[in-house]
Amino acid sequence: MSSASGKPDALLVSAPKIALRRALESDRAFVERVYFETQRWIIEALLGWRGDDVESERFAEQYGAPNTSIVTVDGEDAGWLTVQRGSDIYLQSIYLVAKHQRRGIGTRLLQALLDEGRERGTAVRLDTARINPARRLYERLGFTTISEDRFKIYMQSTSCGSG
């Protein structure tokens, strides 16, 4: 097809509408479910599964609702992220349900944090399991490894600032 100007029409594919909303206590079951759906294999590989009760208790110790946002895609809850903002920006957690992975959603969320870091002149940092395939995404977006331990790598964006 061609437009009135005689030029071919671009293939119109609408990007999903991504929004964030503050996590509420009523989101707790969703947040925990998404965490274990996306991370159980990593927990099993690195630590061994210690039972549902133990893992739920450990999750409860780490989960920080005040800095957590629910990611919505086209109005549907699709995942969550936790961001700490201080002298730098620390992405503590980002999880998307399987059907919303590999669609550019994580990239757009991370790019927004990187843009914020550039505007503020501060670093964006994160850590992830050494075996997490998302590491490739982080590297593609300009994060570099600043340190490692037995289970995790600690990364910082090289394009935002020194923190």
Image: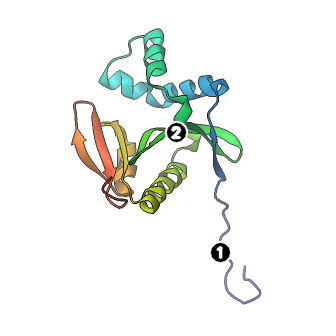
> Alpha-carbon distance for marks 2 and 1?
34 Å
Q: Which of 84 and 109 is in front in this view?
A: 84
Q: How many C-alpha atoms fall within 10 Å of the one at disc 2: few (<14), some, or many (≥20)?
A: many
Name the residue at 43% across, 17% down: 58
Of all residues shown, which one is farthest toward the front? 87
Q: What residue type is labelled 2?
A: Leu
Q: Does residue 95 appear anywhere in the picture?
A: no
Earlier residue among tags 2 and 1: 1
Instruction: Determine which of the numbered discs, if any, sits on residue 10 in the image.
Output: 1
Q: Residue furthest right?
A: 4
12 w.r.t. 161: above or below: below
Image vertical order of residue 7 relative to residue 119, above or below: below
From the top left corner, tell me how far across and down residue 140 is, in percent.
37, 56
Query: Residue 138, how many percent across, how many down?
Result: 38, 50
Q: Tell me the quarter of the picture where residue 25 sits.
A: top right
Q: Residue at x 62, y 33 (%)?
A: 23
Q: Name the residue under label 2.
A: 81
Residue 24's place in the image compared with 163, above or below, is: above
Q: Circle 1 sits in a helix, a strand or a loop, which is it?
A: loop
